[in-house]
Amino acid sequence: MLRTYRHRGFVLLMVLVVLAIAGSLLGLCADRTSRRALEAGIAARALQRRWGVRTLETACLAQAETILREGRREDEPPPAVVRLQMVLGGMTFDLVVADELAKANVNRIAAGRGTDAVRAGVAALSEGRWVLQVLPRPVEVPTDEVRTPKTLFVSLEQVFSAVSPAELLGAGAGIDIDAPAPGDLLTCWGNGKIHLRRAPPSVLREALKGVFTEYEVHRLVTLRDEAPEAGLGTLLSRLELDEKVRSEAEKWITETSTCHSLWVVARGRTRNWHRLSVRQQGDAENDAGNWTFEW
């Protein structure tokens, strides 16, 4: 009888060991399966995000001029920036389409008036709205490309000591923002010219410093608003400028745009992804170019 009990005790012990091993293996398999399912979900959302960003970039950047024209509201000046929101596959995307020639070009300011002028210009455009420290850090970029003005700033991150993409966009790129954000008024791209119709008065004032007086900028803004169909030549004639000033003005003022940008902000459950794409058409003084930044 004693041997029988010992045999039964050994069998019971073996059963418990097997159950413990089986439970451990099942737990390990369940953990691995859960991890793979989580990774698959993350990969699927990442693929969906990348697909959405690239699709919107391809569709919108090529049609930037059309979007800007159609974004004009009645009885308002032509917009330099248009904000849109789209949903693709259940994911929300904020879009910011802009005319880079309707913004103050920090490269032209730095090349013509020096780095201190960049600091003063940003402060003037801010009007106390941006809680950002201005710290211009120009770096001449060696390149074989033809660029006018000379490239000293390749990103607005060189203008501020520390700035996030959400701060550049204002309110995280939402469709409605209370006031222009840094990215609405400042640019590092384009040929340095300023778009007469789209640039707000503050940008025109800053972009034309050294070309026009404050009074002449005020008169130009008044004339363009009173005669939206009048061409640049007509408006300059009404200003009654001397030949030298008019020649300089024609060099830096334009009514067409050759550089556009598109921000795409993909809104996730725990964070947002930002992608900025800039496309510049070539002209007599600049090679064509494309720039992309991601955060």
Image (cartoon, rainbow, N blue to C red):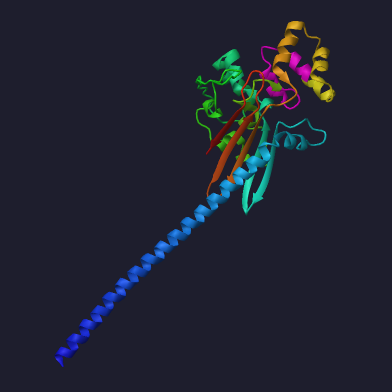
Question: Residue 155: x and y, percent?
Answer: 55, 28
- Return the residue found at the far bottom: 1
In front here: 75 or 236?
236
Q: Is residue 174 above or below residue 203?
A: below
The quarter of the picture where the N terminus appears is bottom left
Quarter holding residue 206: top right
- Side of 115 relative to 220 (left or right): left
Query: Which picture quadrant has residue 16?
Result: bottom left
Position of residue 292 in the picture relative to residue 175 (left or right) = left
Q: Position of residue 271 (x, y in %)?
A: 53, 47
Can residue 162 be seen by looking at this rendering?
yes
Relative placement, left or right, of 47 versus 62 is left
The stretch drawn in magenta includes residue 212? yes
Q: Position of residue 198 (x, y in %)?
A: 74, 27
| Picture layout, residue 156 above or below residue 59 | above
| Residue drawn at point x = 54 percent, y = 52 percent | 45
Pick the residue in front: 241 or 160: 241
Q: Quadrant of residue 264?
A: top right
Q: Is residue 223 left or right of residue 104?
A: right
Which segment did they paint magenta? 195-220
- Is residue 213 visible to the viewer in this orientation of the structure? no
Q: Is residue 126 above or below residue 16?
A: above
The reply to whether the magenta stretch includes residue 141 is no
